[in-house]
Image: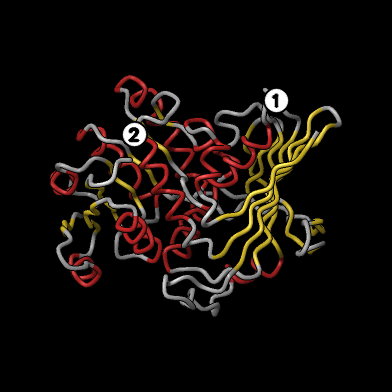
């Protein structure tokens, strides 16, 4: 275990950042709280925690924030703004970087701009280590098993609701602006921008959820993480209609805590299907609160990196750098997983 080591959390006062700080403390790490707003950091800090404010455009301040820490977890969106400066700072400090970005473009930028540099430096950079991107990638990789390639992968998100945080809203606005309000699909081995309406479909989720109306091609970060290491030319993601409506509704409330851990009552079922030559394999994950579950995903990643349980270095998605099935087993207190197939 890497317990006892200091881990910086950038955006520590945000909704997801608070869950990450709590998870680090529970697992014996020493979180160092950082972010852009000094007042919010001090308000969020527990007794004895180190607070290091750092504007994202101030390289010297970022260097001070990361001094003496073993790793950094970036929880501050929009990641189009924060990811590159934090990665640069992590490279200067010689420490691993993990983020929880769901932004498609920001994750693509990380692979494009830092893959060669990270590999040359022997650095570990893991983007999208979160509910969107990371979990789907782990599930798809575990479902693939001994397959070296597949014809298609489908990730269906069965959320009973999606009350967005302020960070989710801000990140979504940046993504829409970057793509000119077009939507993105991953087909024929590449990303395409489309301006038509996404298809309305029905997805047969496993029991007890059952068949539900979904928005087809409701594209998430999985279209970056899966193709980064899996030979799958078609990657499609789907979202239950209710959740898709929530996240774009300006009047939708923020997540509300309903237990002592601060989790909301939201539930999720992620259904991943990979197909190859008429054969099909499936991985299903069930849990509660997409923001809260991001914390054990990110902190487990940090623990594995710091204890050398990785497959090489460079920029890598969760399924590429970790043993997917073993990682999912480690999440059993937070996510239940079933893997089936031919």
| x, y percent for residue 146 | 68, 25
Q: Secondary structure at mark 1?
A: loop
Q: Residue at x 42, y 23 (%)?
A: 312
**Residue that lies at the very extreme toward the right in this rendered image:** 278
Q: Position of residue 298 (x, y in %)?
A: 42, 48
Marks 1/2: CA–CA distance: 28 Å
Left or right relative to 152: residue 285? left
Which of the pair 285/176 is nearer the observer?
Answer: 285
Q: Position of residue 228 (x, y in %)?
A: 55, 31
Image quadrant for the N terminus?
Answer: top left
Q: Residue drawn 73% across and 29% down?
A: 150
105 vs 114: above or below: below
Q: How many marks?
A: 2
Left or right of 210: which side holds 73? left
Crowding near the residue tagged with mark 1, few <14, some 14–19, many ≥20 C-alpha atoms within 10 Å = few
* Image height of 258 relative to 4, above or below: below
Q: Quadrant of residue 31?
A: bottom left
Q: Secondary structure at mark 2?
A: loop
Residue 294 vs residue 231, the one in the foreground:
294
In this view of the protein, which residue sits in the foreground, 104 or 205?
205
The type of colouring in the image is secondary structure
Task: Please identify, in this view, whether the residue under mark 1 or under mark 2 is nearer the observer.
Answer: 2
Mark carried by residue 205: none
Check the image and name the residue furthest to the top. Answer: 120
The residue identified by callout 1 is 147
Task: State if disc 2 and disc 1 touch (CB < 8 Å).
Answer: no
The residue at the point 33 percent across, 48 percent down is 73
Give x and y (percent) for residue 174: 46, 56
Task: Compare marks 1 and 2 and give the one earlier in the sequence.
Answer: 1
Label 2 Cα crowd, 10 Å radius (few <14 / some 14-19 / many 20+) = few
Label ID, residue 307: 2
């Amino acid at each position: 275990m890497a317990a006892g080591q200091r881990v910086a959390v950038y955006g520590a006062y945000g909704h997801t950042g608070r869950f990450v700080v709590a998870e680090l403390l529970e697992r014996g790490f020493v979180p160092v709280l950082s972010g852009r707003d000094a007042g919010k950091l001090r308000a969020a800090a527990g007794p004895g925690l180190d607070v290091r404010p750092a504007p994202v455009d101030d390289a010297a301040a970022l260097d001070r924030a990361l001094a003496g820490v073993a790793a950094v977890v970036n929880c501050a969106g929009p990641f189009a703004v924060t990811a590159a400066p934090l990665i640069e700072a992590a490279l200067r400090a010689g420490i691993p970087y993990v983020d929880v970005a769901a932004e498609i473009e920001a994750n693509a930028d990380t692979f494009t701009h830092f893959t060669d540099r990270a590999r040359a430096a022997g650095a570990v950079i893991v983007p999208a280590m979160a509910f969107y991107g990371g979990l789907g990638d782990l599930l798809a990789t575990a479902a693939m098993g001994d397959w070296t390639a597949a014809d298609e992968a489908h990730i269906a998100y069965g959320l009973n609701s999606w009350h967005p945080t302020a960070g989710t809203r801000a990140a979504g606005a940046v993504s829409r602006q970057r793509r000119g309000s077009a939507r993105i699909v991953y087909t024929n081995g590449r990303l395409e921008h489309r301006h038509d309406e996404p298809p309305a479909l029905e997805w047969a989720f496993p029991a007890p959820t059952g068949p539900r109306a979904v928005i087809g091609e409701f594209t998430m970060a999985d279209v970056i993480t899966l193709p980064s290491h899996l030979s799958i030319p078609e990657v499609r993601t789907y979202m239950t209609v209710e959740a898709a409506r929530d996240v774009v509704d300006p009047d939708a409330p923020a997540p509300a805590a309903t237990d002592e851990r601060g989790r909301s009552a939201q539930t999720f079922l992620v259904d991943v299907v990979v197909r190859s030559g008429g054969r099909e394999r499936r991985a299903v994950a069930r849990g509660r609160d997409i923001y809260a579950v991001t914390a054990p995903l990110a902190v487990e990643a940090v623990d594995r990196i710091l204890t050398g349980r990785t497959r090489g270095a460079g920029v890598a998605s969760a399924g590429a750098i970790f043993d997917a099935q073993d990682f999912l087993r480690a999440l059993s207190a937070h996510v239940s997983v079933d893997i089936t197939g031919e």
